[in-house]
Amino acid sequence: MTNSLQFPYITRRQGEGAHPALAQLERHWQSLRDGLSIPRRAAVDPNVIHAALPWTFVMHRVAPGVARVRVAGQRLHDVLLMDPRGMPVSAFFAADDRSTLAVHLEEVFSEPALVQIPLHRPASLLRPQVTGALLMLPLLDQHGEVTRAIGALVTDRPIGQRRRIRIDGRQPIRHEPIALFQAPEPQEMQRPNVKRPALRLVVNNG
């Protein structure tokens, strides 16, 4: 019996066969917007995303292109075979991909934007290929600044200790900028259908 999770459409967006953890997390994030551009960190309800929690993490932007993991689910421990809390997100990635990751991390916080990155680790002589995806969703902190993000990292099998995942350049990166403010919808002026009486000049000669 294999431990592979077998998610053939792991990188697709919500509603198109995405990994269940990615789909559930994005649905909750979208529901929290409620007419706002970005949800607040305090509004995230773990009970609503309980099925996604093992793959979920919360990160804190500490510098341009750099974010540290503050909270991490158990499956991230199992996949990475280490405790990711306090580590920069880049620590999960091969050195050659860290500069590219930094660009996308900064997009999450500065634009801000929803970003989903396809992942893989090439097969080797003794290890099969690993495929996965990283979803990152911006959040507001207690001061109304975009310094937090919630995300999920899913793979079809463990990466292995001291091994790193890579960005899969064969697959498109999902990048959706989010407007900081939503302009109110223009309201049409209500015009009565009845004709107004013509203006009459009244002269009082008395």
Image (spheres, grey):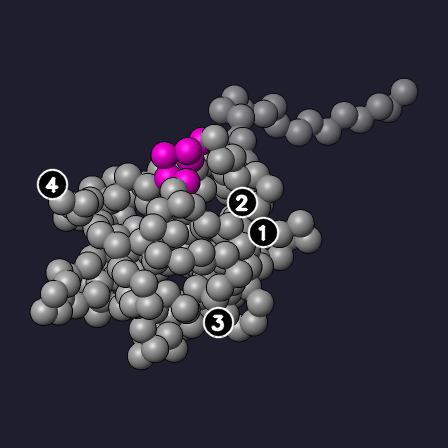
Asked if disc 4 and disc 3 are in contact, CB closer than 8 Å, the reply is: no
Query: Hey, which residue is sitting farthest right in the picture?
Result: 206
Of badges 2 and 3, nearer the viewer stands: 3
Magenta part, dominant SS: loop
Determine which quarter of the picture holds residue 124.
Answer: bottom left
Amino acid found under the numbered disc labelled 4: Met
Residue at image coords 39%, 52%: 77
Q: Which residue is mark 1?
A: 140
From which residue to which does the magenta span run?
Answer: 48-53
Sequence-wise first label, 4 or 2: 4
How far apart in space, not on screen, are marks 4 and 3 (Cα)?
40 Å
Q: Which residue is mark 3?
A: 65
Residue at image coords 90%, 20%: 206
Of badges 4 and 3, nearer the viewer stands: 4
SS type, badge 3: loop
Q: Any mark on residue 39, and which?
A: 2
Asked if disc 3 and disc 1 are in contact, CB closer than 8 Å, the reply is: no
Residue at image coords 9%, 69%: 125
Q: Which residue is mark 4?
A: 1
Amino acid found under the numbered disc labelled 1: Leu
